[in-house]
Image (cartoon, rainbow, N blue to C red):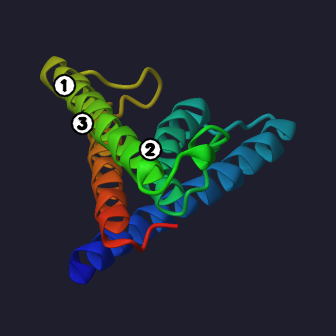
Amino acid sequence: MERFLGAVFKLNRFMHAISGIALTFIVLLTTADVVMRAFGRPILGTYEIVAMAGGIVIGFVMPITSWLRGHIYVDVLIKKLPGRGKDVVDIITRCVGIGLFLMIGWNVLKIGNTFCTAGEVSNTLQWPMYPIPYAVGMSFFVLSLVLLCDIFKIIGGSYE
């Protein structure tokens, strides 16, 4: 079990690093575009590139945020539950989350497949659009794995 949890955590860290690189790229590209506009030479396709990289940033940071529990969590009522009641509620919410994120991931992959089949490209640069929904869809599957890891931690008593 520890190997599985460790592998999922490493995958999360890898995706987090990619999102950090993409965010840094967005900042540098936007800054360069603003500076170049002052000289009358804007960077072609900046809006498209920033939008695509933004999808990567948002999609790839979700699993590590869930792993580290960096999201907003309101537990006013759950704290009042006796004994294992909190664990039961946590497991139920994780199961619902897994189902939800699996469905979202599957549908985002279908969107990517539609883009691929239709040959959808960006307006200015004519770059294919399908890799972004594929990457974001896969990040939802990784997020589902994180929620499964949470369930294992809850059952094992190491979830805090």
Label 2 environment density (alpha carbons within 10 Å; few <14, some 14–19, many ≥20)? many
Is residue 65 rendered to the left or right of residue 32? Answer: left
**Which one is in front, 22 or 98?**
98
- Direction from residue 15 to residue 47 in the image, left or right: right
Kind of residue at badge 3: Leu
Q: Locate residue 22, reporting x and y percent.
A: 54, 55
First along the sequence among labels 2 and 3 = 2
Element at label 1: helix
**Secondary element type, mark 2:** helix
Q: Which one is earlier in the sequence, the residue at label 1 or at label 2?
A: 2
Question: Disc 2 residue type?
Answer: Gly
Query: Nearer the observer, disc 3 or disc 1?
Result: 3
Q: CA distance from mark 1 to mark 2?
A: 16 Å
Q: Could you tell me how far apart the alpha carbons at marks 2 and 3 are, in whole angstroms?
A: 14 Å
Residue placed under numbered mark 3 in the picture: 102
Q: Which of the 4 quarters of the picture holds residue 137?
A: top left
Helix, strand or loop for disc 3: helix
- Residue 97 lies, in percent from the top left, at 35, 37
Question: Which residue occupies 34% across, 48% down?
Answer: 91
Q: Mark 1 — residue?
A: 110
Residue where numbered disc 2 is placed: 59
Q: Are marks 1 and 2 in contact (CB under 8 Å)?
A: no
Find residue 20 and report its horizontal and vertical position in percent: 57, 62
| Residue 76: quadrant of the picture | top right
